[in-house]
Image (cartoon, rainbow, N blue to C red):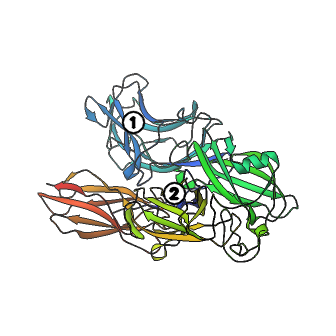
Amino acid sequence: MSTEARTECPGFRGVTVGLLAAACLLAAPSPASAGTYPMYQCAHGTPAVSPGWSVYGYNTEASTVLTNDCGSGALGDYVFSNEQPGAVTENGSSGSQVGLALDVPSSAPDVSIQSINAEVIGSSVTGDDAWLGFASAGQSLSGGAELPYGGSSDYTASDSWTLPQGARDFEAYVNCSTDHSSPTCDFADSTSVPALSDITLTLEDNTPPVIKSASGPLATAAADKSTVAGSQTLSFTASDADSGVRSATLTLTPQDGETPYTHTFDFAAQCSYDSWNACPLTESVSEFALNTATLKDDSYTVNLTVTDAAGNTASDSLGTITTAGPPSTGTAGTPIGSSSPLPSVGPGSPAALRGPANGTNASDQATLTAHWARTPKGSFTSRYGERERITGRLTTSAGQPISGALIDVYSTPGYQGAQARLSAVGMHTGPAGEWSLTLPPDYSSCTLRFAYRSHLNDTVPAATASLTLRVHAGLTLDIAPHTASVGRQIFFSGVLHGTPIPPGGKQLVLEASSGREWVEFRTISTNAKGRYHASYRFKFPGPVTYRFRVVSPYEADFPFLNGISNGVAVHEH
């Protein structure tokens, strides 16, 4: 059994209304500096590699195939001549060459490779001598070496290379020379001619992202330099053709020079850092609601800044707003878009403090209902990846619908102390007072609270409702191969879905069954991204067919119920 985890910095993805992008915590790498970002390739537990990798052969009769065994942590060149694995037959007086090549794909038009770190494996050789070399942009790089001769141990090394400025390619190759009488280099390991593992590419991207649009009442008011009160919403779309959009920040800077108000939309949970576009190329936020009553009366410059995965930024000055509402003091509660408490404002407070009425037929005597679409109960148990729908209705105490009203939605620490994953968001009721909410598929166990404020500056709701959600974690399992014999290994790999993954990884249990009963035989851990890798060597002769599965036990620091993977059959013969 082997496991490996990479420690990475935590990130937060914000939540918005309307499109309801999921909010969650997930570990994600931090870019080294503005203009660069890491890309991890072929580490233990990684299921695949990004486009751009290939193999080649010059002056040889050998065929070459790209081997992607990233589940075991290696990417290599598999060669064979005349159906003989591991053989490179020369075809020229100057010898032959086979290699592993990397080219930045067209999906990242302005990205270049600044440097590479990797573990290098070169198979030992018999027949003719073989040399290992590296190159980029037509230039030789350091690290060249003669491969071990005579069937001894393979060549292994930890190497790093700084590539020429603007380089978009890299080659690791083996030259089969003509030093001996044999016309062939015979490699002991046919998949390491050569092979790379645990690869980290430092990529360079100096092209800033683009703010494609910004709209909504807040943007309109800022452009018109208007005075605002109560809840104001903002929608925007940003794009980046290279490293991708990582975050956006809304900043309101008061003219009196005091500390600006900021809200960051962090999309880090959607950033894999195992592809050329580390983050999504386009991100949209719909109807983020800012309660301007949380701001003291002043004029504010409104600015939106977008940051890509490499740290490049683009800013758009939306204009200026002037707030007209009560100062943010007191301890009554926390409204939308703010971490500061408000004074107790609600039924019985002066009209000047309460702001505009919230909806048609707004009333201090209101009834708010909330129901799961699949059960009438107030609590519900779901599985990771299922999009649960909630419906409800808002009416006056006399049964009249309250339409066009903003309903606040909060996620609080839920099942057995699970951490909150949803920031305060909001949505509006329809003509009959109806409303609905579809949760993202990666939601965790929590308690959801819904609140209606009869006036937009109120901090005391006129009506509330709540629901409890319990979610089983998601688990996948792959096994290779599906047949084995005494002394042969099988390899387990997969992903634990659900965030936040604990910083040190999440404990999992491997179970096996040859009948009806499942038996635990090993405990393993995921890495910080939820990926895991393990192996098992059969010790007793078959024939027998086993089923294997992975279980995620409940733990207090992971906000999900236990999860169970699919079962995979392996035949021992």
From the image, which quarter does the C terminus lie in?
bottom left
Asked whether residue 480 is in view, the answer is yes
Q: Which residue is mark 2?
A: 434
Asked whether residue 98 is in view, the answer is no
- Determine the residue positioned at 73% across, 67% down: 354
- Of the pair 184 and 512, the residue shown nearer to us: 512
Q: Is residue 366 left or right of residue 91?
A: right
Residue 534 image position (x, y, % from top left): 34, 60
- Determine the residue positioned at 52% across, 72% down: 413
Furthest residue in direction top, as rendered: 92
* Marker disc for residue 334: none
Looking at the picture, which amino acid does disc 2 mark? Answer: Glu
Where residue 288 sits, quadrant-wise, is bottom right
User: For numbered disc 1, what is the local secondary structure?
Assistant: loop
Q: Which residue is mark 1?
A: 129
Mark 1: give few (<14), some (14-19) or many (20+) Cα within 10 Å: many
Residue 414 image position (x, y, % from top left): 48, 72
- Determine the residue positioned at 79% across, 61% down: 260
Q: Is residue 360 left or right of residue 416?
A: right
- Of the pair 202 and 322, the residue shown nearer to us: 322
Where residue 166 sits, quadrant-wise, is top right
Distance (Cα) linking label 2 and label 1: 77 Å
Looking at the picture, which amino acid does disc 1 mark? Answer: Asp
Furthest residue in direction front, as rendered: 398
Residue 29 image position (x, y, % from top left): 57, 56
